């Protein structure tokens, strides 16, 4: 079996504002320095707006600081919320980060789904998919075309030289966040790789990978050779019971800060966790979304998932700092 890669989906959560915001950033950056030394492939920075769930409105600015503090770690966006950007500004910022980091960018793009973000930014949520798709195509065209002319549904440019170009040629590797059949189908038909998120069950992610494989083949593309980062919430402790306690506390925080019915915009066809009651949601996450347990159990669970689905890149979202450290020290070395 081919070696696995591991990355970290890095949030900048500010639960109950218990510490100062600079402390939140400092702790996250210290963790990222550990990733650089420990053998992780990449840190993937999560962009969110107007919420203490994750106070990182610019993954590109944060990426510059990550580049300054690390030597080998790749810097992923998970994701740039492309529908909210002027696409040429987006192309410039990601390309600049790629140059400043010495060609270490993994670009992940997503459309977003939080109605608050769309309302505040003045973008109609019903246009989110089309705006996102056009922004992705413009961004890549800006990187690969000496002078760009474009006439689309939302944007028009004539003979624009977009600078800088990325250091990685023809451009940084690209992933699109996809959770619905429509999003998976569009990405596959256009030959894009995908990112799969942490809020779907193991079985749902396996089904989405199979759908992606079929849609790729229908579009004349192959699954072989692609890395498909699959994000999983993770809780690790000295005992299974302690790990489950961490997992339950983490799910409660996610539910309180992030999940609510107003955000249920059809991201998954399998039953949306944002519309579930608390007891049903907890059972879903603990039983089918979170990898949790003592280190030996977590290793076994990862091996099981590798055997049951296309899992060659695990993107962990630790539910506590102690979980991150124990995963780094006692789980990650088993796969390196």
Image (spheres, grey):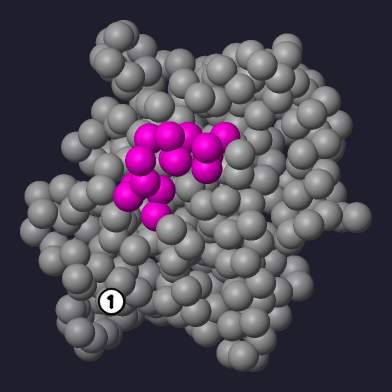
Count of numbered marks: 1
Query: What's the residue at 20%, 72% (across, down)?
Result: 127
By secondary structure, the bulk of the magenta-drawn segment is best described as helix
Residue 80 place in picture, x, y as percent: 36, 53
SS state under label 1: helix
- Please say if 293 is above or below 195: above
Residue 223 appears in the rendering: yes
- Please say if 68 is above or below 99: above
**Which quadrant of the view contains residue 301?**
top right
For the residue pair 40 and 161, the one nearer the viewer reads as: 40
**Which quadrant of the view contains residue 297?**
top right
| Residue at numbered disc 1 | 130
Residue 145 place in picture, x, y as percent: 41, 79
Query: What's the residue at 64%, 57% (across, down)?
Result: 203
For the residue pair 9 and 294, the one nearer the viewer reads as: 294
Q: Is residue 166 left or right of residue 314?
A: left
Residue 261 place in picture, x, y as percent: 25, 48
For the residue pair 159 and 275, the one nearer the viewer reads as: 275
- Please say if 214 is above or below 242: below
Q: Is residue 121 magenta?
A: no
Q: Quadrant of the C terminus?
A: top right
The residue range painted magenta reads 272-286
């Amino acid at each position: 079996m081919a070696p696995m890669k591991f990355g970290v989906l890095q949030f900048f959560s500010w639960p109950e504002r218990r510490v100062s915001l600079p402390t939140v950033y400092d702790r996250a950056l210290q963790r990222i320095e550990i990733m650089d030394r420990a053998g992780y492939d990449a840190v993937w920075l999560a962009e969110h707006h107007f919420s203490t769930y994750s106070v990182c409105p610019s993954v590109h600015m944060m990426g510059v600081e990550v580049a300054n503090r690390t030597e080998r770690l790749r810097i992923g966006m998970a994701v740039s919320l492309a529908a909210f950007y002027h696409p040429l500004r987006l192309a410039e910022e990601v390309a600049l980060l790629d140059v400043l980091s010495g060609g270490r960018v993994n670009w992940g793009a997503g459309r977003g789904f939080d109605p608050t973000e769309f309302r505040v930014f003045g973008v109609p949520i019903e246009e989110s998919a089309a705006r996102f798709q056009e922004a992705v195509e413009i961004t890549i065209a800006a990187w690969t075309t000496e002078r760009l002319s474009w006439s689309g549904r939302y944007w028009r440019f004539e003979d624009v030289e977009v600078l800088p170009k990325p250091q990685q040629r023809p451009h940084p590797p690209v992933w699109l966040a996809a959770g619905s059949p429509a999003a998976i189908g569009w990405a596959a038909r256009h030959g894009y790789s995908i990112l799969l998120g942490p809020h779907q069950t193991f079985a749902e992610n396996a089904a989405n990978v199979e759908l992606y494989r079929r849609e790729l083949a229908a579009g004349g593309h192959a699954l072989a050779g692609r890395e498909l980062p699959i994000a999983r919430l993770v809780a690790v402790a000295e005992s299974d019971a302690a790990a489950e306690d961490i997992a339950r506390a983490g799910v409660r925080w996610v539910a309180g800060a992030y999940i609510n019915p107003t955000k249920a915009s059809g991201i998954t066809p399998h039953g949306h966790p944002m519309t579930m009651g608390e007891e049903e949601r907890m059972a879903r996450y603990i039983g089918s979304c979170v990898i949790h347990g003592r280190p030996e159990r977590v290793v076994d669970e990862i091996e099981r998932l590798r055997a049951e689905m296309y899992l060659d890149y695990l993107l962990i979202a630790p539910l506590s700092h102690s979980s991150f450290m124990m995963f780094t020290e006692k789980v990650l070395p088993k796969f390196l």
